[in-house]
Image (spheres, helix red, strand yellow):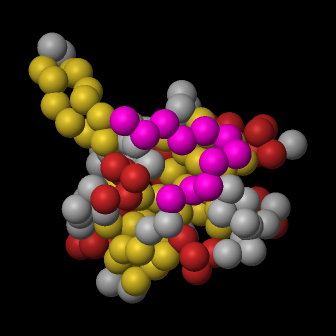
Amino acid sequence: MITLKEGDKAPEFTAKDQNGNTVSLADYKGKNVILYFYPKDDTPGCTAEACSFRDNYQSMLSKGFEVIGVSTDDEKSHKKFVNKYSLPFTLIADNDKSIVEAYGLWVEKNMYGRKYMGTARTTFIIDGDGNIKKRIDKVDTKNSSQQVIDLLQ
């Protein structure tokens, strides 16, 4: 299994966003990116995480960062999620799981004794050259944006 760490090159990807537009990591060359992976649209933890980034989005932009969320949900689910919570950033639909697999985040999970495959909630801070500056594995969903801000200071 792939384990990306600080200093590694972030895997390139191309996929559709919530509006059906094609988005690539290469589109953000020269910009700093907060790339966060989450399990599922409109669930309590994922909603708290997305709303944390939404509430501090202008602060992220002012610090020179773009925010991109990735889950295996489809474009329609992302569109509904964006509209319901007024999310101002891009959500990538990773239907074929190629992005979560490239980042080593499609993992076995265990809930109430039931094992299943799913996305490991993880945030990467990627610099303008496409290198991973920071990796957050223990994401505090309610304070996810503050975790990022604290690491950037």
Foreground: 32 or 86? 32
* Residue 58 in sight: no
Q: Residue at x 63, y 75 (%)?
A: 28
* Residue 3 in sight: yes
Relative placement, left or right, of 150 versus 21 is right
- Magenta stretch, main secondary structure, is loop
Q: Note whether 113 is above or below 13 in the view shown.
A: above
Residue 78, located in which quarter of the rendered image? bottom left
Give the magenta range: 1-11
x and y percentages locating residue 106 in the rendered image: 31, 42
Relative placement, left or right, of 132 versus 106 is right
Relative placement, left or right, of 4 versus 101 is right
x and y percentages locating residue 1 in the rendered image: 37, 36
Per the image, is 79 magenta?
Answer: no
Per the image, is 9 magenta?
Answer: yes
x and y percentages locating residue 62 in the rendered image: 81, 66
Q: Residue at x 15, y 24 (%)?
A: 115
